[in-house]
Image (tube, grey):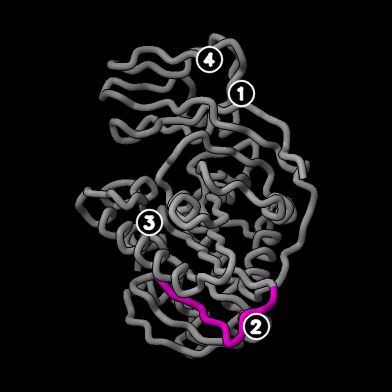
Amino acid sequence: MSPSRPPSPSASRAPLATWLWRCLEGEPIAPFALPGGSAVPRGEGVLELVPERPAVDALASVVSVGIHGDETAPIELLQGCLERLAEGQARLGAPVLLVLGNPEATRQGVRYVGTNLNRLFRRELDEQGMEPDRARTLMAAVDAFFARHGALPRLHYDLHTAIRDSRYPRFVVSPFTERTPVEAAQWHWLAAADIQAVLLQHRHSWTFSHYSKHYHGAQAFTLELGRALPFGHNDLAPLAPMGVLLAALLEGREPPAAAPERMAFFRVAHELMRESVAFRLAFPDDTPNFTTFPPGTLLAEDGQAGETRVGEAPLAVVFPNAEVEIGARAALLVHPEPPPSG
């Protein structure tokens, strides 16, 4: 077994408590019962939890982890929620589609095998390879899940960790769409889950959460829950409030709420793209997310696009990565804005 993977739990434990690790072992999964319902495999790394009777506040929720294979804390967080459900400490009250996004990358302890999976979630995708095929599989699974539960409100939380430190270790990215505004309750739930900042996208991004929002009108978010570390090295204590939110979704009950003003809000002003081989970011590699640069600061140099500098107003940088593929986003440049009213 790779050192990037945790030890397998005892086979004598309830099937739901071992599902994630059995996926990583490549074991076949058969349908099984659980407290309050049943679990139906929908393909490798995809499991639908079906309640005997949906609760009054039930949503049709997609909870995805491991879209980037080396982001292990969300896998461990979800594992804890499933163990509590399997052991009868909670009872299933809502349909939930569980997704282990890129099992092969997780087995190898790498971000991706061939290309970044989290840029491929569009129905017109014509790329070939392991990750494009996986994207098509996951899009079809989400389509079928929401179709089976069309009478319920739709939600998708895609759980990640970032590759660098951050001024706000736990933040959420709200995908852009012209048609589906964020419901006020989501800001209250995320604030109570101890999310520290919100990043509002300014255009289509073709991430997994964007897919559910754009094509299905779901409330959908990419959640960054700290920094990417190997299995066994994650401090899950700061994620406990997020675990409470996930548990509420599984049980079909209203999650805790808090004032959205507890979170800092930002909006994307510009996407910094890598256009050529001759590309560099003009700040240190260990610069944390949400670091602010004053007007006139040189941010990047590209052999084709030239220099990128901060304009008349300060900008903060999020997700800087000079090693992305040519034509891909190398950073988001963002500015603060007031929390939404309501």
Tell me which amino acid carries mark 4: Val
User: What span is in magenta?
Assistant: 46-56
Q: CA distance from mark 2 to mark 3?
A: 33 Å
Q: CA distance from mark 1 to mark 3?
A: 31 Å
The answer to which image quadrant residue 140 occupies is bottom left
Residue 268 point in image, percent of width and height: 54, 31
Does residue 263 appear left or right of residue 250 in this picture?
right
Identified by mark 1, the residue type is Thr
The residue labelled by disc 2 is 91
Of labels 2 and 4, earlier in sequence is: 2
Identified by mark 3, the residue type is Gly
Marks 2,4: beta carbons within 8 A: no
Residue at left offset 64%, top offset 35%: 167
Per the image, label 3 sits on a secondary structure element best described as loop
SS for dot 4: loop
Judge from the rendering whether residue 27 lies leftward or rightward of residue 40; answer left or right. Answer: left
Q: Earlier in the sequence, mark 3 or mark 4?
A: 3
**Mark 4 sits on what residue?**
310
Establish if 195 lies above or below 332. below
Disc number lying in front (4 or 1): 4
Q: Amino acid at mark 2?
A: Arg
- N-terminal of the pair, mark 1 or mark 3, is 3
- Please name the residue shown 38% across and 27% down the image: 273
Percent coordinates x, y for residue 145 in the rendering: 44, 70
- Depth check: 100 or 17 in front? 100
